[in-house]
Image (cartoon, rainbow, N blue to C red):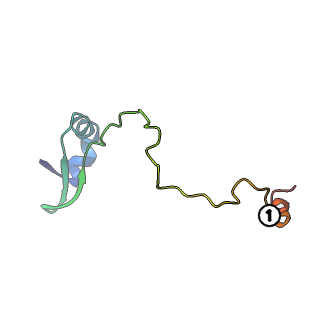
Amino acid sequence: MHTVNIHEAKKHLSAILKRVESGEDILIAKAGKPIARVSPIPSSSGKRQPGSAKGRIAMTQNFIEPLPENILKGFGK
């Protein structure tokens, strides 16, 4: 992991971000003490898995019933 000071990070931000984009972690230090880490964001597969939330979502029995009048009024109905 490469360490840069704040001044260098400000001066060479684009170059640092290119290194991060290629997979490198960069530490930013103030007076030699690390204060932040810049890391690449893992790419997502982009594919959604149907049913992946099964068992994690619950709906009440009255879910499909019409909303009460007092709530509908809040929507201008």
- How many numbered marks appear? 1
Q: Is residue 68 above or below residue 18?
A: below
Q: Nearer the viewer, residue 17 or 42?
A: 42
Quick one: 23 or 59, which is closer to the camera?
Answer: 59
Residue 15 x %, y %? 24, 36
Residue 72: give x, y in percent of width and height.
82, 59
What residue do we see at 46% from left, 49% from top? Answer: 53
- Is 16 on the left or on the right of 50, as rendered? left
Taking depth in this image into account, of 45 and 2 the one nearest to the observer is: 45
Q: Secondary structure at mark 1?
A: helix
Which sits in the foreground, 69 or 3? Answer: 69
Residue at position x 31%, y 43% in the image: 41
Judge whether 26 appears above or below 46 on screen: below
Measured as percent of width and height from the top left, residue 44 is found at: 35, 37
Residue that extends furthest to the bottom in the rendered view of this protein: 70
Residue marked by disc 1: 71
Q: Is residue 14 left or right of residue 68?
A: left
Q: Residue furthest front?
A: 61
Residue at 67% across, 60% down: 61
Where residue 20 sits, quadrant-wise, is: top left
**Residue 11, image x and y in percent?**
25, 44
The amino acid type, in three-letter code, at marker 1 is Ile
- Specify the quadrant that holds the C terminus: bottom right
Mark 1: give few (<14), some (14-19) or many (20+) Cα within 10 Å. few
